[in-house]
Image (spheres, rainbow, N blue to C red):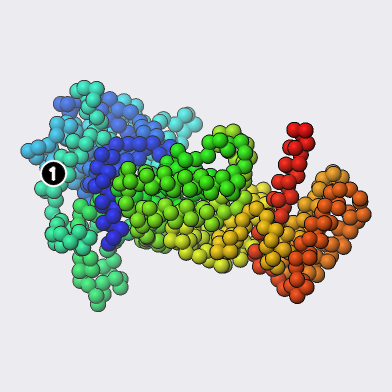
């Protein structure tokens, strides 16, 4: 139960965030109090302190999130009557629900709600606001008041119109409810006595009062909690809606009394595991908060990285460009290089600065433990932890920096500030890697598995799986298969080179051309790169847009390099007839590289992925020298 312990600790370390809303990803989120749930309300009713109706309004979706006091039964309810406290659906809070068109089957819902509210409102320490709400709902005029104030339209029979099917513009209530109008969720507020008085659903004093009330009145079993090893109140009902509002899957559940779950093993769920109510609430609330706050997802799988002492940490899924914009590295990000390409040396220098600054930040903020966790659901009701690792904070950041120092190559991106295309030598994001390996149109279920397989490579420094490199290598060998406008062969090539560089990290390959490298695969890659640049230069001068021979024979070259090179060499022959300086330069380069390939290696044995590094480095070297030459001529 390590993950539950750590999440409960996260909750305890962030007590000041409980009930405090913040904006994340255009959504208001908060860390929920124990024994509370988050609901989206569609109607807000304002009442006086004496329990008299004052006003009502329809709530827009941006402000609908409402913290609601709840029991374990109401938090996990399906069709049976299980009311929340204070705020709830019309069928619970309105005595006249059936009178104005509601189903008679829901009669018991209001009775149960009123019994709960009465117990709290009449308790010795009941807050004034709770008594006011109870006084109002006891009058039994909730739906009637909403009809009078044009919140709920009625038909000729004085029944609420459940769905709007008329040509006239929809009344506001029908724009926010997901079902019919009578399924609306209602929240209450009491007229504020002063400007600092919070609304009921954000009142921390009311939260605390309800928690104490529930502790004194709830009928729970007690026993030893397997998470904390303490004798405490136990629960067999645990949190749902972890990944999103419609997510009913649970990490811990025990509701199969007729299948094979307990047959021949246990008589009841607590014989398998006993978990304390308090630690279950805290762990699930903390996980839900972290997912909303900083989680990322692919398909149904969610990935969350967080610090136990301080929640915000650098995600392992980011690219190098995104790392430089992250909180931990922000002050060490590139500043003077905004207008130029970030070279290998510059990025290495910035990463070294970042690790020194990161260590200082960790010491200042006392961040010692970092958790990386991935969640997924195989079925609608079962949620599983598919990846979990606990790291020392300094080792976690060193692992991320190692990933960015070893799995890197030339990358192209668009600068957010200037909208210009920028280049840097760095690591692509996991998102871009997945698209490069499988294509932008690949099934998200395949991509999420790649994310999970790459996590150990990033945070545990494990070798990159060979089949991933082989898959992207096979895609690159077929340039003309890149038909989608979202797929770029050149961008995919750069990502492939980064992964190959990681696979051969012990051999020290760099983006800078290694002229002394005698590897057969590397040298053949260089030859193809020279042929590509040479013919592209000639075609551009002629204004022709067709593909070069190097590109057309790319796949054949990878499979049968010696034979295919002879074909390409023959087709380049007409270009060598020119006596220009460029032609002589290209011819000299080809001869130099050919001389480095020993005669026994000039064979048709298929090339390994390493040849892409030679190809890419050769092209980058030639284009870089061309740009430098043009710049020098401009200055002169």
In the rendered image, which quarter is residue 466 located in?
bottom right
Measured as percent of width and height from the top left, residue 301 is found at 44, 56
Residue beneath the point at 77% across and 56% down: 530
Mark 1 residue crowding within 10 angstroms, few (<14) / some (14–19) / many (20+): some
Question: x, y percentage for residue 445?
Answer: 51, 59
Q: Is residue 20 above or below residue 270?
A: above
Query: Residue 584's x, y, as percent?
Result: 86, 53
In the shown orientation, is residue 548 left or right of residue 276?
right
Total labels: the figure holds 1
The front one of 432 and 188 is 432
User: Where on the picture, by quarter, is residue 5?
Assistant: bottom left
Whether residue 233 is situated above or below residue 597 in the rendered picture: above
194 to the left or right of 58 = left
Q: How far from the left and from the top, in percent, is residue 490?
A: 67, 52
Going by the picture, which residue comes out furthest to the left? 124
* Residue 488 can be seen, yes or no: yes
Residue at image coords 7%, 38%: 124
- Residue 312 appears in the rendering: no
Q: Quadrant of the N terminus?
A: bottom left
Which residue is rendered at x = 45% and y = 38% of the image?
331
Question: To which residue does mark 1 refer?
Answer: 213
In the displayed structure, does residue 467 sit left or right of residue 604?
left
Residues 155 and 263: in front is: 263
SS for dot 1 = helix
Q: Eyeballing the image, is 437 above or below 57?
A: below
């Amino acid at each position: 139960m390590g993950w539950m312990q750590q999440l409960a600790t996260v909750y305890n370390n962030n007590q000041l965030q409980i009930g405090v809303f913040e904006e994340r990803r255009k959504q208001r989120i908060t860390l929920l109090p124990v024994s509370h749930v988050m609901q989206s309300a569609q109607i807000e009713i304002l009442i006086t302190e004496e329990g008299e109706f004052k006003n009502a309004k329809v709530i827009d979706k941006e402000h609908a999130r409402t913290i609601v006091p709840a029991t374990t039964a109401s938090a996990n309810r399906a069709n049976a009557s299980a009311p929340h406290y204070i705020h709830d659906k019309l069928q619970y809070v309105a005595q006249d629900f059936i009178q104005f068109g509601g189903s008679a089957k829901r009669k018991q819902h209001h009775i149960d709600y009123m019994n709960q509210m009465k117990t709290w409102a009449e308790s010795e320490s009941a807050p004034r606001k709770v008594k006011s709400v109870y006084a109002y709902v006891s009058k039994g005029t909730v739906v009637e008041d909403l009809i009078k104030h044009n919140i709920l339209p009625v038909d000729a029979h004085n029944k609420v119109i459940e769905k709007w099917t008329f040509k006239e513009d929809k009344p506001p209530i029908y724009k926010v409810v997901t079902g019919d109008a009578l399924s609306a969720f209602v929240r209450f507020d009491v007229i504020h006595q002063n400007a600092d008085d919070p609304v009921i659903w954000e009142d921390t004093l009311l939260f605390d009062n309800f928690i104490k009330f529930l502790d004194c009145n709830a009928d729970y079993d007690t026993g030893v909690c397997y998470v904390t090893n303490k004798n405490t109140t136990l629960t067999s009902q645990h949190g749902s809606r972890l990944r999103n509002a419609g997510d009913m899957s649970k990490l811990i559940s025990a509701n199969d009394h007729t299948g094979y779950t307990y047959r021949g093993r246990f008589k009841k769920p607590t014989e398998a595991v006993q978990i304390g109510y308090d630690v279950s609430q805290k762990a699930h609330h903390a996980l839900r908060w972290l997912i909303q706050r900083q989680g990322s997802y692919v398909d149904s799988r969610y990935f969350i990285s967080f610090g136990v002492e301080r929640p915000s940490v650098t995600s392992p899924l980011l690219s190098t460009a995104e790392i430089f914009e992250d909180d931990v590295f922000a002050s060490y990000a590139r500043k003077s290089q905004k207008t130029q390409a970030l070279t290998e040396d510059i990025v290495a220098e910035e990463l070294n600065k970042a690790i020194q600054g990161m260590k200082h930040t960790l010491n200042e903020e006392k961040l010692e433990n970092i958790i990386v966790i991935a969640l997924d659901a195989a079925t609608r009701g079962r949620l599983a932890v598919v990846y979990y690792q606990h790291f020392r904070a300094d080792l976690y950041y060193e692992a991320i920096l190692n990933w960015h120092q070893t799995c890197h190559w030339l990358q192209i991106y668009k600068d957010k500030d200037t909208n210009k295309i920028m280049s840097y030598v760095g690591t692509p994001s996991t998102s871009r890697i997945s698209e490069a390996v499988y294509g932008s149109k690949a099934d998200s279920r395949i991509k999420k598995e790649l994310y999970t397989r790459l996590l150990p490579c990033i945070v545990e420094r494990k070798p990159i799986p060979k089949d991933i490199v082989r898959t992207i290598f096979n895609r690159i060998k077929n340039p003309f298969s890149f038909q989608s406008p979202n797929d770029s062969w050149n961008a995919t090539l750069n990502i492939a080179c980064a992964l190959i560089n990681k696979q051969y990290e012990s051999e020290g390959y760099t983006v800078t051309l290694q002229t002394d490298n005698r590897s057969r695969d590397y040298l053949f890659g260089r030859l193809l790169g020279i042929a590509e640049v040479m013919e592209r230069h000639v075609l551009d001068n002629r204004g022709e847009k067709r593909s070069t021979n190097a590109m057309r024979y790319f796949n054949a070259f990878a499979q049968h390099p010696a034979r295919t090179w002879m074909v390409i060499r023959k087709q380049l022959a007409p270009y060598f007839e020119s006596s220009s300086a460029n032609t002589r330069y290209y011819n000299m380069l080809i001869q130099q590289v050919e001389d480095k390939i020993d005669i026994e290696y000039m064979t048709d044995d298929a090339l390994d992925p390493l040849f892409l590094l030679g190809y890419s480095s050769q092209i980058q070297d030639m284009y870089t020298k061309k740009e430098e030459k043009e710049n020098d001529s401009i200055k002169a």
